[in-house]
Amino acid sequence: MFGWEFPPHIAGGLGTACYGMTKGLAHNDVDVLFVMPSASGDEDESAVKILNASDVEVTEVYGDIKEYLGKVDFVRVGTNMKPYIDPVEFKELAEREQNFQAEEFKIHFGTKYKFSGKYGTNLMEEVARYAVVGGAIAAQNTFDVIHAHDWLTYLAGMAAKKISGKPLVIHVHATSFDRSGDNVDPEVFRLEQMGMIAADEVITVSDLTRNIVINKYGIDPSKVITVHNAVDFSTRESLDTQRNLSDKIVTFLGRITFQKGPEYFIEAAYKVLQKCSNVRFVMAGSGDLFNRSVRRVAQLGIADKFHFTGFLRGKDVQKMFEMSDVYVMPSVSEPFGISPLEAMQSNVPTIISKQSGVAEVLSYAIKVDFWDIDALADAIYALIEYPAIAKVAGEKGYDEVNTLKWDNAAAKIKNVYQLAINKFQ
């Protein structure tokens, strides 16, 4: 299984999902070797074996480097296309680039790559090198099926499939259309589509995502299967959380990016504060819209009732939920969304956008269109001002979320593995 992050060092829901999934697979008698670019050594390996890609030596699988590059012909990420040059000049440029790639690869061949495992400026380079290491891992290990999570790992999964001849399952937790609307990054889209086409089976985290994969990427519906995420509460601790405020607390927790809809949360907060003053709003997270969100809060004159915590992790996330009276996830496009499940586990009444995959499995979360600020403000106001509504939503939500077990989701994933394996028999 190729991933990019694993608790306790995570940047979002993907690592959390991988953790719960691998534990569920272990309970379904599936042994998982989980590969990640940069492991810290303090990951929980009770249900999974972690392999740090930074510790893997890329050995000479084939006798000649060009033979290897020919076998895994998609290792290089990027392009040497140049505008306004004639065919002869382009051919010379392409040959020089190809020779440079071979020489550059030779320098590192037989050595280890040190991955940052982050989402930095050299992300594409790390994705490409991860593919090289993925091929080496496939040659050095015995396994039945390859499972790759999201576009960062698709090339590694494809390399492993080419070298091992084993079936590939890719897991779509989010697409470019979720992250950027219609302004997709063409290079990321290309990698996503390439992985989906190469895969023997494609798992999507919701029917919402499944429809995007089929309609936007042109993938055969017969190999796209929805398996809804779950949530793992087995390691949850009982915390003594002190509240020094009598005000109600309404929380947004997630990346402060276009996809998560933070600006709709701010506008709804302004409307609620026009009607009641016994409420405070908290935005927990970081992202490229952080500064713009701070400025908008200041412009609306609600800074005394609006708090930014920055990125939270581990126990601080649980503490935030337990201090909250209402949780809001106003995502523009959310393939699934684990955070509402975590909030409901803390008996917190939850409001989610209808444009989220988790809306497919929750009956006791209040659902609104992400763009409908009035409906969102009304829902927040109702949960703050009418305790009976909040009590029912909290209790019923708690009961509902505890039926969503990773063991059940993992059993479905195991069935997908078998479908992929059967295609090779």
Image (spheres, rainbow, N blue to C red):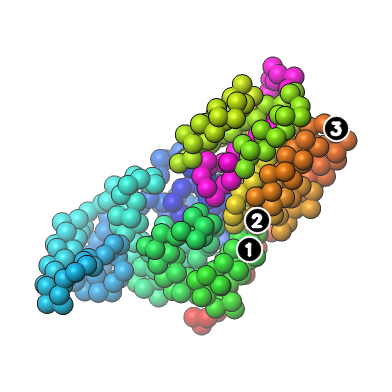
Per the model, the C-alpha gap separating discs 1 and 3 is 33 Å
Residue 220 position (above or below residue 365) = below
Q: Position of residue 149 (x, y in %)?
A: 49, 59
The residue that mark 2 highlights is 355
Q: Which residues are magenta?
A: 236-263
Q: Position of residue 22 (x, y in %)?
A: 56, 54
The residue that mark 1 highlights is 208
Marks 1 & 2, CB-CB < 8 Å contact: yes
| SS for callout 1 | helix
Q: Position of residue 60 (x, y in %)?
A: 22, 65
Q: Is residue 248 magenta?
A: yes
| SS for callout 3 | helix
Most foreground residue, 120 or 168: 120
Q: Say which amino acid is labelled 2.
A: Gln
| SS for callout 2 | loop
Q: Position of residue 88 (x, y in %)?
A: 12, 77
Residue at (50, 54) in percent of width and height: 179
Location of residue 154 (image quadrant): bottom left
The residue that mark 3 highlights is 387
Q: Earlier in the sequence, mark 1 or mark 2?
A: 1
Camera-near label (1 vs 2) is 2
Q: Earlier in the sequence, mark 1 or mark 3?
A: 1
**Residue 159 vs residue 330: left or right?**
left
Q: Say which amino acid is labelled 1.
A: Leu
Q: Which mark is residue 182?
A: none
Per the model, the C-alpha gap separating discs 3 and 2 is 27 Å
Number of residues whose C-alpha sits closer than 10 Å to that of mark 3, classed few (under 14), some (14–19) or many (20 or more): few
